[in-house]
Amino acid sequence: MTKLELLTTSEMAAADRLSIAAGVSGMALMERAGAAVADCALALAPAGRRIAVLCGPGNNGGDGFVAARLLREQGLVVDLHLLGEVDRLRGDAAEAARRWGRSIQPCSALDLEDAGLVVDGLFGAGLARDLYGEALALVEKVNLWSQVSGLPVVAIDVPSGLDGDTGSVRGAAIAARATVTFFRFKPGHLLLPGRKLCGELHLADIGTPELALAAIRPRAFADGPDLWRVFLPSPGLEAHKYARGHALVLSGGPWSTGAARLSARAALRAGAGLVTLASPREALAINAAQVTSIMLTPCDGAADMAAILSDARKNVLVMGPGAGVGKPTMDMVLEALRSGSRDRSLVLDADALTSFQDDPVGFANAIKRSGKPVVLTPHEGEFSRLFNNEGWLLESNGERQTYDETPFHSKLERARRAARESGATLILKGPDTVIASPDGRAAISFDAPPWLATAGSGDVLAGLVGGLLAQAMPVFEAACAAVWIHGACARAIGPGLISEDLPEAMPGVLRGL
């Protein structure tokens, strides 16, 4: 994916307006959109089978009228059905219907018995309410047909019933084999369940001028190398290990040392010049028996942490994996936030987050007072212990703070709000990981494989972030790069992956970058 900017439905509408203002007619945009849909349908349609095109009352339906006409001109048998009345169509959609020039059947007459493919042009990305009545029944009918027959549905813009901004389902949504959208993808194409319902994504150029992006200034992106490659550390000829940063990773006690070792090895593989494992004294021998190129230092609490961090060369600290939940971990996190230079980065994961579940507001205030670059890497469970479902910090009594009552159901917006509330860059993990900066920038990981759903995978990610930060990569870009590299390592390994495999796959992935 090379066009990484993501546009909300309102931003895409603005792009259309800017196109028309630049001299591109709305009908020209619709003709090109319909042509892209027809091309996709032609590639998927079984030979000799009828195509059913379902159109709604808006411009999404207009794209469907164009696609139906072009498919018919290619010699295919096409039946066109409209949800609504022809005489209520307006603007470009009405003109597209006129150019169709054949009979238009109501959707109530839809018969899919001998159809080979359905083109879904009922509703676009800006659907404002849940489907009901005839529209709901129609979506369910198409889904049942496709499930039983195994035959494809091609969706225009988004599968009908899918919210283009959030990826959520509005009552019911088409499950498409392929989705054709235009100019740029929307967040709902990449966020679950939207990503699954869209099937294979196709992005079509319909003549929208690239200069429209300069006016819109999008703040959300699909995560990929073009977003951060220019910032990726690469040692020069004069490099030495001290110039590549020194990552400090906190270990847990003797029965929970493995998670920190995974983080430490990932930081080293990511390019940190030195990595030290700060270990409770009772776990030193266990860790010493398992590591070679990673150094060890004793650390039994906040006082030891302060002494270790008096060395400013240790420029990033990774805390949380296997650290244990409770006051000792809280005290060490707070000490790390207080100690030393504002340039020292912190990556806080797992137990370092859960330890603050009773005082998330105090935790956020400590982050903001520190002035340090901080990355939080929660999964949904850890996120819910610090924030409510809309991304607001929780008060110590478990009540949400009162700011406003606007609900945010999008994972993208929840992560953005939580980043702003906490003052930290947030990696909200999952199959659709979202990376969000306090300044409003955000990225969505769209191609991480399911093999990452294994114990220790998140510990590796935390260390990978730390290793990139140790080399002075900017914090948002480091977080985005780490998430992408993490996924690329998993793709390289494939089935059978265990977390220990991930650091060993990094050299090949980094070489490719």
Image (cartoon, helix red, strand yellow):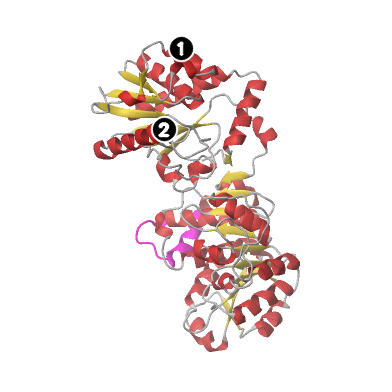
Few, some or many C-alpha atoms within 10 Å of disc 2 (few <14, some 14-19, many ≥20)?
A: many
Image vertical order of residue 443 relative to residue 247, above or below: above
Instruction: Indicate the amino acid at tag 1.
Output: Arg
Nearer to us in this view, 158 or 481:
158
Secondary element type, mark 2: strand
Which residue is at a point 65% across and 34% down the rendered structure image? 213
Residue 155 bears which disc, if any? 2
Asked if residue 36 lies in the magenta stretch, the reply is no
Which residue is at a point 35% across and 61% down the rendered structure image? 496
Few, some or many C-alpha atoms within 10 Å of disc 1 (few <14, some 14-19, many ≥20)?
A: few
Q: Which residues are magenta?
A: 492-509
**What x and y, as percent, mark residue 189?**
49, 41
Q: Nearer the viewer, mark 1 or mark 2?
A: 1
Instruction: Indicate the amino acid at tag 2.
Output: Ala
Which residue carries the number 1 mark? 98
Which residue is at a point 53% across and 74% down the rendered structure image? 260
User: From this viewpoint, is residue 432 visible?
Assistant: yes
Nearer to us in this view, 49 or 251:
49
